[in-house]
């Protein structure tokens, strides 16, 4: 190749082919990594969802078991308002304390 212009053309063409091949490999590797990351992320999300569902189901079973045990002690089948029950018990305790103080002060 004595013609420098022709040699520059072939060198440029060869350089473009090599760059194109390397870009193709790099792009393929990058897309492969993105696909792998996506698959791993989906798998982790699936596992997370399963774990949350399992825990929720276990908590619901425990709550249902607790309700079954407490509902066997209840006379009616109406749902129990726990806060109302606590408030009633506190009011009864306060009333009993008041009565106890009155009894103690009258005994002295």
Image: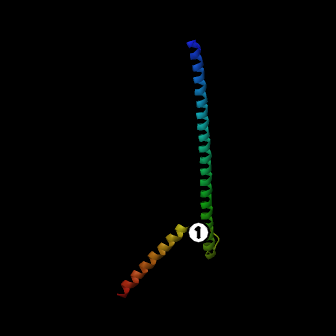
Residue at the farthest right position:
77
Compared to residue 84, the image places residue 51 above or below, namely above
Count the labels in the image: 1
**Which of 43 and 36 lies nearest the eye of the viewer?**
36
Compared to residue 21, the image places residue 73 above or below, namely below
Residue at mark 1: 80
Residue 74: x, y in percent?
Answer: 61, 74
Compared to residue 19, the image places residue 99 above or below, namely below
Residue 5: x, y in percent?
Answer: 57, 13
Residue at the farthest front position:
2
Q: Residue at x 62, y 35 (%)?
A: 28
Q: Residue at x 60, y 18 (%)?
A: 10
Q: Residue at x 62, y 46 (%)?
A: 39
Counting other residues with Cα less than 10 Å from the Cα at mark 1, is it few (<14), some (14-19), or many (20 or more)? few
**Which of 88 and 39 lies nearest the eye of the viewer?**
39
Q: Residue at x 59, y 64 (%)?
A: 59
Residue 4: x, y in percent?
Answer: 56, 13
Picture quadrant of residue 17: top right
Which quadrant of the figure contains the C terminus? bottom left
Which quadrant of the figure contains the N terminus? top right
Q: Secondary structure at mark 1?
A: loop
Residue 63: x, y in percent?
Answer: 60, 67
**Which of 34 and 85 lies nearest the eye of the viewer?**
34
Picture quadrant of residue 75: bottom right
């Amino acid at each position: 190749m004595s013609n420098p212009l022709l040699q520059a053309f072939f060198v440029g063409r060869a350089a473009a082919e090599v760059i194109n091949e390397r870009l193709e490999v790099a792009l393929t590797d990058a897309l492969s990594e993105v696909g792998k990351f996506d698959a791993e992320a989906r798998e982790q999300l699936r596992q997370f969802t399963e774990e949350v569902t399992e825990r929720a189901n276990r908590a619901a079973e425990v709550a249902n078991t607790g309700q079954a045990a407490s509902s066997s002690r209840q006379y009616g089948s109406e749902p129990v308002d726990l806060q109302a029950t606590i408030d009633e018990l506190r009011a009864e305790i306060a009333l009993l304390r008041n009565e106890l103080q009155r009894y103690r002060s009258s005994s002295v």
